[in-house]
Image (spheres, coloured by chain):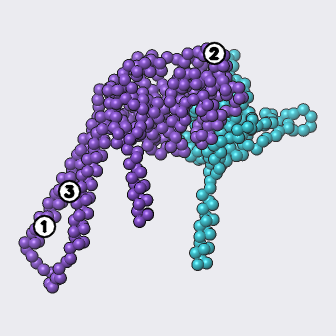
Chain colours: A cyan, B purple
Amino acid sequence: MKRSALLLLLLLAAAAGCQREERDYRPNPVASETRETIALSPLSPGANEPVTATSGKGRDYENNAYHLSQGKKLFTWFNCTGCHGNGGGGSGPPLIDDRWIYGASIEQIVSTIREGRPNGMPSFRGRIPDDQIWEIAAFVRSMSGNVPASAAPNRNDDMHPGPAESRKSPSQPIAGGTTPPAAAMPK
Amino acid sequence: MWLRLAIVAIGLSGLTCCSGWQNALDPASGDAGHISWLFWLFVAVLGAIWALVMVVLGMALMMRSRRIDDPLPSHPTHDRRAAWVIAALSGATLVTVLILTGLSFAGQRRLYGPREEAVTIRVTGHQWWWEVRYEEEDPSRTFTTANEIHLPVGQPVNIKLNSSDVIHSLWIPNLFGKLDLIPGRENQLRVTADRAGLYRGQCAEYCGLQHAHMSLMVVVEPQDAFERWRVGQIAPAPPPEDEERKRGQAAFLSQPCVMCHSVRGTTAGGRVAPDLTHIGSRLTLAAGTLPVSRGNLAAWIVDPHGIKPGVNMPMIKLEPDDLNAISAYLEGLK
């Protein structure tokens, strides 16, 4: 009796492992765009480093398989592939490598998508709802292996030249990179 | 006693759905009629066999066995008769199975075989809605709509099926049997509707969270009404005339709506969500989830995930004035 009760308890405890993640289908209906203070360069006037402040929203998105796979779908739907290819770059810089012109953190990527960047990256603020921008940014991080492999998308629906995002080896972000010649201003 | 009554009552309640707009036993086309004929034939033949088996089983249980002194008796005439009975029954089983299989196979050939067609429709399954494209040789007569199929009575129609994401299955029970929509593959379905009416179809292959809210309406109408509808659908959306709808159009075009939806005749040209050019003329919204009305349009825009959790339509934070104007604009897109 006691043993079977113990076994039942153990089984119940094991059932807790079935919970993988919370899927947040319905974003907060009243929240507006989060405020992310980012720095694009280590320089700042005076003795201090540039001031940065993040809302912490990025952690929830980077560790969530649902948000990452939605981001993967939106990446194609909103024609990010039009310039960045499937991450390998085209007229836009590649996203699967370790070079980051405007920063590799999710907040920096969100700002890049929201605000646009020189030489061709348009601003998507007011075009893509903010929660979807976070999903796309999380997926962009996963393309270079910078999100947990347990959450990253692990299967492509079509033929794909590279391994799935969950099998990408993590690449330490390096500041820099260049605008590809295709996107450079004509001389 | 009460339990048995309850079981019988529940069983009988199933019969109440034997008529209506989503029912394989109320056929509105020759193909559905054939399927329904096959169904009743199978029920009759197999029911008769089942009843016969039950009667023989009952007789065997009722008959008292005689006491046998010799454990291994030998009755040559009896044995021969038993062998004949077993052979005859096996033969009858084989013939029945072969006939039924043959009829079923012939039915499949009839349903899915090549035929002449007057109208070609391409239905693409998406999570969780149906894209419907009327294809014609003349590209100016080709147009796209969503979640609603119109068919002319008595005209053979070819429906090409494919999918953009996962496997779906199109099932309009009153008109034809199920056929899957498979990504990267084209399946074809032919149907000739015999009876005008409004029918309902449903995704019949589990395709994700909102599989249950993936239905579509089929309007079967006389040839001239169908042609009027088609001409109306081919036309781009007329520009709005009153002030409110003008504001609605401006708001619609400046909001994220245009990233996914298209309204022909405007700059909205998204291709990944239902075409809204004539949304006001359609019967339902969100793949058969809500009837189209100004109030439902506003409710759907303001909180899609409250109505259809997990749907790909995002919640867009609109100003109440904009929401009001956009829903007026969309409702007027007849």
Evaluate whether residue A117 shows in this view: yes
Point out residue B146 in the picture as x, y percentages from the top left corner: 49, 29
In this rendering, would B66 be left or right of A3?
left
> In front here: B45 or A68?
B45
* Amino acid at pointer 3: Thr
Residue B212 sits above or below residue B252 on the image: below
Position of the N terminus of chain B by quadrant:
bottom left
Find residue B93 and name its label: 3
Mark 3–mark 2 Cα distance, whole angstroms, equals 73 Å
Label 2 CA crowd tier, 10 Å (few <14, some 14–19, many 20+): few
| Residue type at tag 1 | Ala
Nearest to N terminus: mark 2 or mark 1: 1
Spatial CA span between label 2 and label 1: 88 Å
Tag on residue B242? Answer: 2
Q: Are marks 2 and 1 on the same chain?
A: yes
| Labels in figure, total | 3
Q: Position of residue A5 (x, y in %)?
A: 60, 74
Quarter occupied by residue A19: bottom right
Residue type at numbered disc 2? Asp
Q: Is residue B276 above or below residue B28?
A: above
x 62%, y 26%: residue:
B327
Answer above or below: position of B321 versus B82: above
Residue visible at 50% across and 43% down in the picture: B212
Q: Which chain is home to disc 3?
A: B
Find out whether the residues at labels 3 and 2 contact each other: C-beta distance under 8 Å: no
Residue B263 x %, y %? 56, 22
Instruction: Tell me what residue is drawn at x 37 percent, y 29 percent.
Output: B196
The numbered mark, 3 or 2, whose residue comes first in the sequence reads 3
Q: Which residue is mark 1?
A: B83
